Amino acid sequence: MPQSEQLIDIREVAETFGKSVESIRKYKNFGIIRVIDKRGNKDFFDRSEILKIRDRLRDFRLKGLSLSQIADQLGAARGDLATPPMRQGYAPAADTDHPPKVLIVDDEAEARSALGEFLQGQGFVIHEAVDGEEALAKAFTEKPDVLLLDLRLPKLDGYQVCQTLKGNPITSGIPIIMVTALNTTPQKVKGIEYGADDYVTKPFDLEELFARIKMVLRRAQPAR
């Protein structure tokens, strides 16, 4: 089958699963299905992998597994599935079967959506938080590989979140990139003093941010 026929978009995936597009987006967010190509704003998936996942998904659902449990089961079984090359993506050298998780913390839905769509296209599993308290909770429950942290947040600001995570031995190894519109030297120094691993100023170039994420992940690998 030609490569163009092997790729299907999210609507075709929905038809294959017999689900709504919204349900398929949830599968994508949980890492159950993987984007292998992106053209403009459109995600594409490997047809043969989708068919195999669909067959496995029925069994998992009969067992009463949650979406996160299904994602874990599929991750453990990826070696049994066709694994197409991921275009422009990042795969950690230690374990290519488990794509890195990124926790995006921003109170602006549009910013989370745009950043999440881009990073999903690069092979990341996306988790989101809308305020500082949710960020702390998800840092413990989701165990992200990297955290993109806005400074101006409801409930707890980014500095408080960073200080709390870096002060706890369970989460201190998570790389934190502060993403903010504040572009003054004192703000940057304060972020570094609280333990931030890097600092990106809005508006930013997505490719530059992607490069910085890969950099902090490489630095964190020997210690984690």
Image: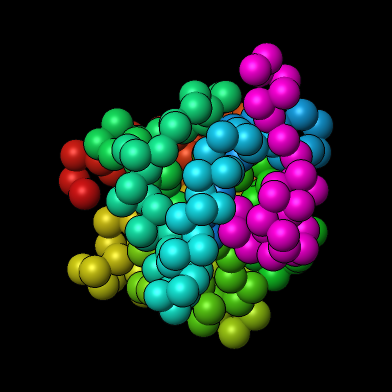
| Residue 82 highlighted magenta (yes or no) | no
6 shown above or below 172: above
Residue at 56% x, 53% y: name it.
54
Which image quarter: residue 205?
A: top right
Q: Is residue 5 above or below residue 131?
A: above
Q: Residue at x 37, y 60 (%)?
A: 72
Quarter location, residue 3: top right
In magenta segment, residue 9: yes
- Magenta highlight range: 1-28
The residue furthest bottom is 155
For this rendering, which residue is in front, 178 or 99?
A: 99
Residue 164, quarter of the rendered image: bottom left
Percent across and percent down for residue 32 are 51, 54
Q: Is residue 179 left or right of residue 92?
A: right
Q: Main secondary structure of the magenta part?
A: helix
- Residue 116 can be seen in this image: yes
Residue at 41 percent across and 38 percent down: it is 81
Q: Is residue 144 visible?
A: no
Tell me: residue 7, above or below residue 26: above
Q: Quadrant of the N terminus?
A: top right
**Residue 203 x %, y %:** 74, 43
Measuring from the top left, give residue 179's x and y in whole percent: 60, 52
